[in-house]
Image: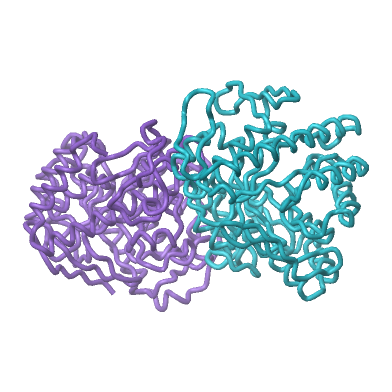
Chain colours: A cyan, B purple
Amino acid sequence: MFEFVIDATSGPARAGRLTLPHGTVETPAFLPVGTQGTVRALSPRDLQAVGAELVLANTYHLHVRPGEEVVAKLGGLHRFMAWDRPLLTDSGGFQVFSLDGFREVREDGVEFQSHVDGGRRTITPERAVEIQWTLGADIAMAFDHVAPGGADIATARDAMERTLRWLERCARRHDELKALPDARTLSPRNSPGEHLQPSVLASGDQTLWPILQGGVHLTLREAGLGRILDMGAWTGLAIGGLSVGEPKQLMYDMLEALQPRLPGELPRYLMGVGFPADLVAAVERGVDLFDCVAPTRHGRNGSAFTPDGPVNIRNAEHREDPRPLDATCDCETCTTFSRGYLRHLFVAEELLGLRLLSLHNVRFLIRLAAEMRAAIRARDFPRWADAWRRRYTQTGSA
Amino acid sequence: MFEFVIDATSGPARAGRLTLPHGTVETPAFLPVGTQGTVRALSPRDLQAVGAELVLANTYHLHVRPGEEVVAKLGGLHRFMAWDRPLLTDSGGFQVFSLDGFREVREDGVEFQSHVDGGRRTITPERAVEIQWTLGADIAMAFDHVAPGGADIATARDAMERTLRWLERCARRHDELKALPDARTLSPRNSPGEHLQPSVLASGDQTLWPILQGGVHLTLREAGLGRILDMGAWTGLAIGGLSVGEPKQLMYDMLEALQPRLPGELPRYLMGVGFPADLVAAVERGVDLFDCVAPTRHGRNGSAFTPDGPVNIRNAEHREDPRPLDATCDCETCTTFSRGYLRHLFVAEELLGLRLLSLHNVRFLIRLAAEMRAAIRARDFPRWADAWRRRYTQTGSA
């Protein structure tokens, strides 16, 4: 069950509702990242408490550890991580290209070195789809070839063309899996070379989204978009290969140029973007979904998002500060603890600090998305975005 | 407000209720340890969820970081750590003796090296009481001299005698602080050399408990006990200097020998004891209160308490195990996650694992205390304890 309904627009910004097998996602939405089947330092109850509606997990990481067969034997990814709401699995393409160690891209797929045991493994488009099918998320992503942020047009074209050829293979394999009779009841097979595991989902209950590549080259992106849309009737569209090292303004310009060309009826997912100002800029340019490790990674480093810009809680100025981290925030961290206590937790290297700042940062982005929805529904997004930006970039006031 | 009522006994085992300014504690009770003003990896909501009624914090640690003045400025220890239920602060005596680094015991007090900045500091009995008054816990502990587990009788006597002299000084200073007019409203003073800070408690709202030392020498313990009881009308009595390296049986024997000599009306607090089998053995010997870092420390190492003995969740046997850690447990960890997932969290070095096993282990000891209360109230403790021990020590079944 996949449905996307846009109920309001304000300029290019859109507010809507994405219905998935495991529930509904209000858009614009921020997806917390649970790389290894857990959003670092947060529990499923925490995620529920901060209002997460869709969580991302990483195919690459779960494939190398604990392995998708283990996840399947433990009831599939939803049951495994005790998250009964919508899940999306990234295909592993980005991870294979961004992690350290050996990798070799061939037309068939990518051979790489596992960051866990150093062993050589190969992921093909078909395998990426099979692994994701076995994990059983609501949304699977096509296996893509990501070019670096500064790639020239030839390199970017090569990666994009390969991504398009792989997309066809992904879609074909996904269709085959969906056509399997009663996939839910297939018994596990563990013989070497036979990796396909039963899905915990009924065969029709997973959708596959394509990823548009093309680097910072609009002509490539336009061509790629046309060919993706020619390829089938998708339920969503991801924009990959941005926020990978190129200047921010190039990303904004690309989103602005793409926006009128994107089909209006598909949810648009900008992959790997998660700084507050980037979310606002991307929603202004018509994006609906985002994921990023920034809120949890920064939280673990003691950096907190606030409406007045980032706060480093380790700073000595917070030592005796009885105020909450963010007076506008309703999260457990902000309604329970002082900045002075949070600073103490970081200075004393207490685990609770990592959790409390991660919790707040994720809540901050989810609230930001909710505020954007409200502004769009009030047909007031451009004015709201300007006011938000003015406050956020007035550095020093936090 | 301090009251201790015993409502049932079963042999030497007692069940009762300790009333403190911030609430009531059912005994026997296990106190989770929040060394630095946080029970490692757990939030106050977690502590409430697992049924903690009394939490311990460490005077030494909070004195060296962030400093008791900071805690006082942030509203006192209850407000600081957002725990509005009963708190107990250890005096720092045990920490000063057990942490690495320079220390010199003089009659006046102890000079030691801070584990945070390496600086030399001195804690006297008076300072220990002042710091605890400033922190504002419900129960403060007297500053004691702990002899090592294997100390000969001369060393143990020396430490015990000093502890008794220090107890007199602690009690005098505590009485002076309680007699201060309207201590609650004293304004903060920060001039160098003037460390006394306003308590967040009304002057009558903190009690001081003595600590009985004497090592494994019953004659010393008996003499010390008599002199403590001669010294005043206490609201509780702690047994220190056990579980510090001596054989377990010696600790059990000492508790058994002391039990008929202890005043029946005072709550008995066995400091630093927290393994499941030790709790049961000590309750059998008339102890009411316990604290220990074992549940959280072991939890962070992947070791979980279960009714069938400890389980190391890292073991490969748990890889695909869909069962809960402890099928009898009602905690979030056991009602939500499989052993396979918990193992994955530890193998993948995810922070959530540290929290989930800590949470379970604390809940395990709190449930154990509750089960003991029920068995005592059913006048059935000896039989219950034998059955519990039989199951717990049948190793291999977990």
Which of the image's four quarters has the N terminus of chain B?
Answer: bottom left
Along the line of sight, the residue nearer the viewer: B79 or B48: B48
**Does the image show residue A364?**
no
Residue B91 shown left or right of residue B285 in the figure = right
Q: From this viewpoint, which residue is outermost toward the right?
A: A219
Residue A155 shown left or right of residue B96 in the figure = right
Rendered location of residue A83, percent (x, y)? 51, 53
Seen at 69% across and 67% down, the residue is A370
Along the line of sight, the residue nearer the viewer: A92 or A318: A92
Q: From this viewpoint, which residue is outermost toward the front?
A: A181
Residue A363 shown left or right of residue B297 in the figure = right
Please tell me whether residue B177 is drawn above or below residue A254 in the rendered image.
Answer: below
**Does the image show residue B218?**
yes
Which of the image's four quarters has the C terminus of chain B?
Answer: top left
Please tell me whether residue A342 is drawn above or below residue B119 in the rendered image.
Answer: below
Indicate the quadrant where residue A374 lies.
bottom right
Rendered location of residue A88, percent (x, y)? 62, 49
Indicate the quadrant where residue A276 lies.
bottom right
Seen at 36% across and 32% down, the residue is B317
Residue A182 shown left or right of residue A10 in the figure = left
Along the line of sight, the residue nearer the viewer: B293 or B360: B360
Rendered location of residue A293, percent (x, y)? 66, 47
Rendered location of residue A324, percent (x, y)? 60, 66
Total numbered labels placed on residues in the image: 0
